[in-house]
Amino acid sequence: MKTKVLFLLTVLLTLSTVNAQRVTGAKVGYIDMEYILENVTAYKEANTQLEAKAQRWKGEIQKKQNTIDQMKKNLSAERVLLTKELVDERVEEVEILEQELQTYQQDRFGPYGSLMVQRQNMVKPIQDQVLNAVQDIAKKRRYDFIFDKSADVVMLFSSKKFDISDLVLRTINRDVKREGRAAQLKEASEKSKFDDEDKEPNPEIEARKKEREEAVAEKEEAAAAKKEERQKLLDERKKTREEEREAKKKAYEEKRQKLIEAREAKKKEAEEKRKKREEDKKKKEEARKKEQEEKSSGGAGNGK
């Protein structure tokens, strides 16, 4: 704010000095860069293409965000059914996707992203044309000062009669028709179709992008190593559990076989005891019959 005030004071002082030297006073004009840009056909066409591409980028970002939100929702619903290792794995996967989404947003809409760079590339040729036109008009019509109304300079009041924006537009259009600039602007517009691979590489942007990519790659590598380690641990635990189950199963089968053999042995012993009791009973019955027969035979002999 102080810089703007000092600038205005300097301008006023200069105007006063010039006015003192020239009876007719200083000749001042201004332009409205936003108005000029809005009325340049090449800029309007390029801006329409850029807005369409920005909408497509926003759609891709929303799609990625929906995927992350669904993963979080699924994790919240399944958390009680998962082991701690699986929960940590899911959480880490979501964090990686969120980091990738943040990097994509910065690459597209950040201060050094595709949208800003391509918009600057789109505006700069027209700004150069405006500057050339302003300098030509100022020289031919002897302007002392020409300001940009849309810039940071604070203009508390501006009369329409000092606005030379339309004059600048006519000058630009005349130059385009005379020098065949329409073909050049179209070629420049076609050349910069707002594809990342066609734009001029910016060292600072490339450095930031490389740094983000390396950070993401490092995190992904660490996550992959951690995932592999967890998988190895899970495999070892699974193998141990299977071995324990096999050992328990084997012990159970051995115990079951012993019980079966013990029951069979007891059954056999009981059967032998039963047979022996039957044989003893049979022998006793035979002995009793024999004894009775002997008694019967003895009684008959005594009677004779």
Image: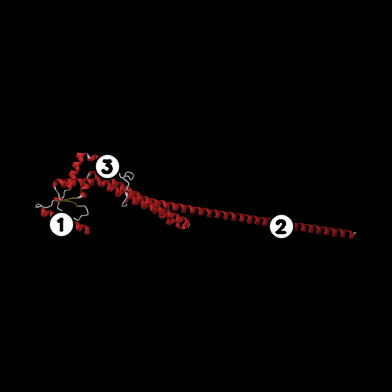
In this rendering, the answer to whether 292 lies above or below 109 is below
Query: Looking at the rendering, in which quadrant would you find the N terminus?
Result: bottom left
**Earlier-in-chain disc, 2 versus 3:** 3
Q: Amino acid at mark 2?
A: Glu
C-alpha span from label 3 to label 1: 43 Å
Q: Position of residue 26 (x, y in %)?
A: 13, 52
Secondary structure beneath dot 2 equals helix
- For this rendering, which residue is in front, 23 or 185? 23
When asked about the image quadrant of residue 179, the answer is top left
**Neighbours of disc 1 within 10 Å: few (<14), some (14-19), many (20+):** few
Q: Are marks 2 and 3 in contact (CB under 8 Å)?
A: no
Q: Separation of disc 2 and disc 3 at Cα?
A: 107 Å
Q: Which residue is mark 2?
A: 269
Task: Describe the element under mark 1 as helix, strand or loop.
Answer: helix
Mark yes or no: residue 39 visible: no
Q: Which image quarter is the C terminus in?
A: bottom right
Crowding around mark 3 (Cα neighbors within 10 Å: few <14, some 14 to 19, many 20+) is some
Q: Nearer the viewer, mark 2 or mark 1?
A: 1
What number is the disc on residue 13?
1
What is the x, y in percent for residue 48?
Answer: 27, 46
Q: Which residue is mark 3?
A: 188
